[in-house]
Amino acid sequence: MVDDTNSPLPGASIIVKGTTIGTQSDFDGLYQLSVPQDAILVISSMGFITQEIVVGSQSTIDVSMVPDLNNLDEVVVVGYGTMARRDVTGAIASVKGDALAATGNFSAAQAMQGKMSGVQVINNGDAGADPKIRIRGINTIGNNDPLVVIDGITTGASLQDVNPADIESIDVLKDASSLAIFGSRASNGVIMVTTKKGRYGTQKPTVTLNASYGVSEVNQRLDLVSASQLVDIIDEARTTENNQLGGNFQLYDDIWPNDNWARQDITDWQDELFQMGVTQDYSLSINGGSDYTTYGFGASYRDQEGTMVGNFAKRMTLRANFETKVLNDRLKLGGSMNYSQRESRGSTQGMIWSSDVFRASQTPSSTPAYFEDGSPYQEQDPDKIAYIFPGDLLQNQVLLAEDYSNPNNKILANLYADLEIIDGLNFKTSYGSSYSQNFRRAYAVQSLNPRGLPATLNVNSNRVLTHSWDNTLTYDKSIGLHKFNVLAGMNNFNSDANGLAGFRQNFPEGDPIELRYLDFGAAETQTNTESASNVRLVSYFGRVNYAYNDKYLLTATVRKDGSSRFHKDVRWGTFPSFSLGWRISEEAFMSDVSWLDMLKLRGSWGQVGNQAVGADYAYISTVESGVIDRTQNGKTDYIFGEGQNRTTGKVIVMRGNENLSWETTTMTNLGIYFAMGNFGGSMEYFYNKQTIYSSTHSFLILLVTRMVVKLLLQRLTQDR
């Protein structure tokens, strides 16, 4: 069994037509099956055209699978279900897991870059960085991150928490027709992730082991002045200051007439900043199934060092899922679990004055990196500091990568039951939960420079526990040329978060490692904060899919959400949508156009909401006491009275707004999709309008109008 490149194709299904007798190709593409001579083998694999082969007198049958680029009957994942590609009326982009794993990226988000129209992935280049994903641009003045759903789990899932090699497919929902079923959580788009699972039938366990090793480096460095050139520049600037503004600055040779310390190139600070990045990646997966049960297991470990000193990312993941059929296949019971442990440290970017690259480029090459004893060098001569660093003294780049830890643990779990009550009528209940814990320590060593900063320690601990319970009723029915799919359901979502932070500075001289704890900092510099929040969301939703004669398509959706973020009088929001599709290629007048496999016109209109438009309790005024910030003016203490007693007061830090309510995005989308053999494409026009409602007033926040044209010539990436 080989693919179109003549490479072994594991996991292909080989079944005797009309029976349950079958097997799967192994890792080398080999298979073995005992069948009668009159048997017909049905051979299938995702992404390839299904073949039927008559056995006859053949004892060995070699099969070369043909790619199915357009696979119009392929099932795609939508909210609370699946649909055939040909029946989709919304804007959905898809990419197969094999295309993601082939990139070798740390996360699936990085691997998605450039593979889907309307999906922008912004990566800052750090090892293990969590890229920003923007679906059809900026959609809100607040958080623009899309909702990530992994195997139906909507409780705090992240693409960072799953190994790309474990992903079967990713579907991105982009317009109101596909998004409205998620209501207030879908205003920034939805990313549906399906992980690999076993298959029903006589599938033997399929074991896949991947190992990779790679290196990376910065291919272009900054062209900086030499130490001698820097002295000339500083002297020229001082001369200009003296001549034009009456300054009294001394030149280098006047200060150090017989010492060329500043003209000697001692350190290449880009060598101290950049390094050869090394990446190691290992993953193991086991998938299998029988006539009544499927199972899957995966484990992975990745260790990546970035191209900047101190930049690293480590991740370990565990994945397991199962499904079993009972009651004569009418009841399916299943579940999944995904555990991830991540730790990373990124570089300092964004603000130019504090960025790592800027710091390195501004440190003179005449400055040593280390003392003779091997400890990081810090200049202490005030005259040298005043000459080389006229502004704020820049810290030794070597010191910036010293004491930092940021471990993050997360577990996602889901259990479900799917009961076929009568033919076509299914009830499904699903409970998902996630728990994440992050503990961050950042210790900055003290500066020996007279104008340097004292040692500081920041400690943060955050915990988030979420629960989501879904109940849906689905009915499928075909009557002649009419096909119906009706969905009704409810969701109960709850999220509890807790955060604790502490800060101190002025630690013991020498920065001994055993004393780098909050208790050893100066008590008068301490700042301690704790926060907690609880967000609850109750939702009711429904959807109708209708097709007539496989030509004319209709989808209508409505969702009603109630959020604890808003005052009770404005707590509920309703978000409707509808879409129409016309498969022009199925019309009689197109029957002679044999070169066109599919031509579909579709349009949609709808609304989705966003509850994250302020703090969790934005309708309540909040007060704080004690130290609001680390400046004297930030303290709420006040001394008054005859005894001059210090009294702690309170200050309003946020004034509540009981009228603040949903941010609503109204979306209009028009699209045309075509497929011709191995060539396909789509053209989209969409118009988005965001509005925040407060009392009886609405404020227009953002208008987005775009034309997106995409022509595809790939097997693994498709856009409808």
Image (cartoon, helix red, strand yellow):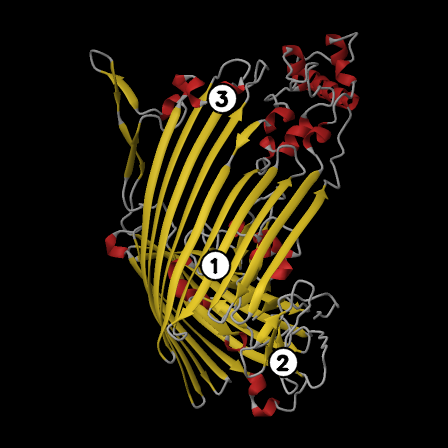
* Residue found farthest to the top: 258
Spot occupied by residue 424 in the image (x, y as percentages of width and height): 38, 79
Structural distance between the alpha carbons of marks 3 and 2: 71 Å
- Label pair 3/2, CB-CB below 8 angstroms: no
Mark sitting on residue 516 = 3
Mark sitting on residue 621 = none
Residue displayed at 46% across by 61% down? 322
- Label pair 1/2, CB-CB below 8 angstroms: no
Structural distance between the alpha carbons of marks 1 and 2: 32 Å
Residue displayed at 72% across by 77% down? 60
* Residue found farthest to the left: 642
- State the quadrant of the N terminus: bottom right
Residue type of the residue flagged with mark 3: Arg
* Residue 436 in the figure: left or right of residue 574: right
> SS for tag 2?
loop
Instruction: Decide: few, some or many residues near mark 1? Use Cα within 10 Å; few <14, some 14-19, many ≥20.
Output: many
> SS for tag 1?
strand
Can residue 246 be seen? no
Can residue 173 be seen? yes
Spot occupied by residue 588 in the image (x, y as percentages of width and height): 57, 92
Mark 1 lies on residue: 321
Considering only vertical position in the picture, is 348 above or below 22? Answer: above
Instruction: Count how many numbered circles sit on residues in the image.
Output: 3
